Image (cartoon, grey):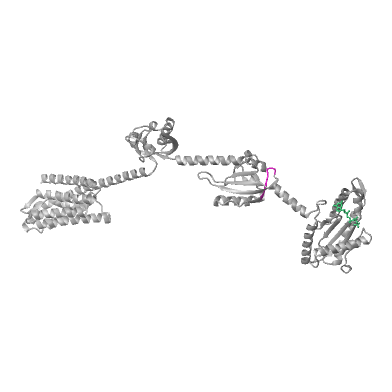
Amino acid sequence: MFVELVKGAALLLALCFLHGANMRLWRRHPRVGKAFSGLIFGGICIVGMLSPLTISPGVIIDARSVVLCMAGLFGGTTVALIAGVLSAGWRLWLGGAGALVGVLSITTCVAAGLAYRYARHRWRLGVGIWPLLVFGLLLHLAVVGLFQALPAEVAARINETVAVPYLMIFPVATALLGVLLRDVEQRQATDLALAGSAARLRAITQAIPDALVVLDAQGRCMELFSRDDGVHAAGAPQRVGQRMHDMLPFGEAQRLVQLLQDTLASGTPHKLEYTVYTPSGIRYFEGRVQSLGTQVNGQAAVLFLARDITERWQAQQALHESELRFRSLLLGIPSVSVQGYRADGTTTYWNKASEELYGYTEQEALGKNLLELIIPEPMHEAVATHVAHMFSSGEPIPAGELRLKRKDGSPVDVFSSHAYVNVPGQEPEMFCIDIDISRRKAAEEEARRLALYDTLTQLPNRRLLTDRLEQVMAASSRSGQIAATLFVDLDHFKALNDSRGHAVGDLLLREVALRLRACVREQDTVARLGGDEFIVLLQSLGQDPAEATSKARTVGESMLAALRAPYELGGQPYHCEASIGVSLVSGHSQTVDEVLRQADNAMYQAKTMGRNRLHVYLADAG
Ligand SMILES: Nc1nc2c(ncn2[C@@H]2O[C@H](COP(=O)(O)OP(=O)(O)OP(=O)(O)O)[C@@H](O)[C@H]2O)c(=O)[nH]1
C-alpha cells in the first residue's frame, strides 16, 4: 500500500510538472495547450489504471478520481472532458464488473471538479488547503457511495478493507494536488503578468521619444530602454556597463552623477538640462532622475529619463531673441511711449519715450505700480477694472484718448492703445503704447477759443454771445424770468484812434472790457461785437417788465459811471463816455437778431439824444 502511495505521489508530481510545462509551451495558443493538458491528465489516469489496487477481478481502485476532479477545477471544461473521455474509454476497455461504476465515478469526479471551478469563479470559493480537503472528502465519500452499486460481496470487501484508508488518503491527495496545481496556476499568472509588463514597457519605450536608463550610484548604465533610433540608444548593447562619462562630456557627466547621488540621498526626484554632441550637431536634453526604491544587482539604483528638448529649446531661444529684438527696438523709438505691466500693475518695461513723456526714469518706473505712476486718482478704479478684464479675458482695452499725469503731477493728454501679450511659459503682460497729443489738444482748444472769443479783449464774440442769448431766451421761456440786452457803444472813439493811434485805441477797448465785466454778476455775459461795440446780457431780472427795466437801467447807469472814470492810456490821461441802448428779453417771442437790433436802435436813440446816456427800447417806438 505504501509503495502504491509513493507511486501515486510521483504520478501527481509528474502531472503538475507536465501540466505547467505544457501551459508555458503553449502560452500563445491556450486552446492547444488545454487540449494537451487534457491528454496529460487523461494519460496520467490511464497510467494509474495500469497498476491499480485490484479488489476483485474487474474491480480496481486508483487515483483517477483525484486527477480528474483537479482537471475540472484547474483545467476547465476542455481539459476535464478530454481527460474524462480518455479515462472512461480506457476503463471501459479494461472491462470487468467494476467498469460501469468506474465510468460513473469518472463522470462524478469531472462534474464535481467543474462545479468547484464554477463556484470558485462565481462565488469566489477558495482553493486553499482546507476547502480542497473538504471537497476531496465529500467527493470521495460520493465515490465510496458509488462503490455500493457493485455486487454486494465486492462492496462489502471494499467497505471492510479499503474504504477507510481510501477516505483518509485520497482527500489529502486531492488537497495536495490542488495546492500544487494552484501554485502552477499562480506562477503562470505571474509569468503572464510579467510578460505583459515587459511587453508594455517595450512598447512604451519604443513609442516615447525619451530614453529610460537604469543607473547605479556611480552613473554606470545597468539597463537601457530606448527607441532604437534614439541618441542614447546608439550602440545600446555596448552602453550597458558604460559610465555616464563614456557617453557625455566630462562636465555634464559630473553634474549628472552628482544629481543621481543627491537623488539617492534625498529620495526625491531631481532634474537637469544637459547637452549631447552628436554627428548631426548639438542636442539639448532634459534629464529626470528618480530613485528606483529597489536594488539592482545588489546596488542602489536610479531611473534616469532623458528627453530630447532640442526643438523646444530652439523655439524658446528664437522667442527670447525675438522678444529681445522687439524690446530693444521699442526702447529707443522716439515719440512713442511704450510701457509693459504685469496683471497686478507692476511695471516691467519703460522705454525712453516714456521717460520723456511722463518724467520718470526707467529705474524709477520699473517695479512700481501703474496706478501710482501715471493714473490720476479719479481714474484708479476704472483702470484697475479694465486691466483685470484684459488679463482674465485676453481682450485688449479699446484704444482712446486719456488724460494721464506726469511725475510732477501735471496732466498729459495721450492717445493710448493696449496690447495683451501672452507668451507660453512666461507671465502675461499688458503693453501700453501712448502717443502725446497735448499739442493737438492745445491747438484744438486754441481754435475753439479763437472761434468763440475776441482776441483783443478775451471777451466772448458775436458767435458765443448768440449761443448764450439763445440759452437765456430758452431759460426765460421756461422760468418766466426776464433778461436784458445792453448795447454799449463808445462815444467818439474814432477820434481817439485818429489822434493817438490804433494801439492806444486798443488799450482803451481792453480797459473798457475790464470795467464792464466788473459791473456785472458771474452769470451775466459781456461780449464784444466788434469795433467799439459791446453787448452786456443780464439774466434773471425778475418776472415783472417794469422791475426788470429798472434793474437793467441801474446796471447800465453804473456802467456809464464806470466808463466815465479817468483812464491812463500810454502814459496820457483820457476821458471816455459811452451810449447804451437797452432791450428786454422775455421768452422766445423775439429772435436773437431782433433783440440785438432793438438794443442797437435804443443805443442809436441815446446817441441822437446827446450821447453819454442810456435809453430803453420801447416796442411801440419801433
Ligand atoms: N483801435 C481800434 N479801433 C478799432 C477797432 N475796430 C474798429 N475800430 C475803429 O473804431 C472806430 C469806430 O468808430 P465809430 O463808432 O463809427 O465812430 P465814433 O467815433 O465812435 O462815433 P460815435 O459812435 O458816433 O460816437 C473806427 O475808427 C474803427 O476804425 C479795433 O479793433 N481797434
Above or below residue 185? Residue 551 is: below
Where is residue 465 drawn, in percent x and y?
80, 58
**Relative to 286, 468 lies left or right:** right
Q: Which stretch did the figure color magenta?
A: 402-408
Nearest to the observer: residue 320 or residue 478: 320
Q: Is residue 280 visible?
A: yes
Residue 308 is one of the magenta-drawn residues: no
In the figure, is residue 487 to the left or right of 51?
A: right
The residue most toward the right is 610
**Res. 551 in view:** no
Quarter of the view holding residue 545: bottom right
Q: Nearer the viewer, residue 607 or 147?
A: 607
Figure disc tally: 0
Whether residue 493 sits left or right of residue 288 in the image: it is: right
Q: Name above or below for residue 613 compared with residue 209.
A: below
**Which quadrant: the C terminus?**
bottom right
Relative to 442, 431 lies left or right: left
Residue at (84% x, 67% y) in the render: 544
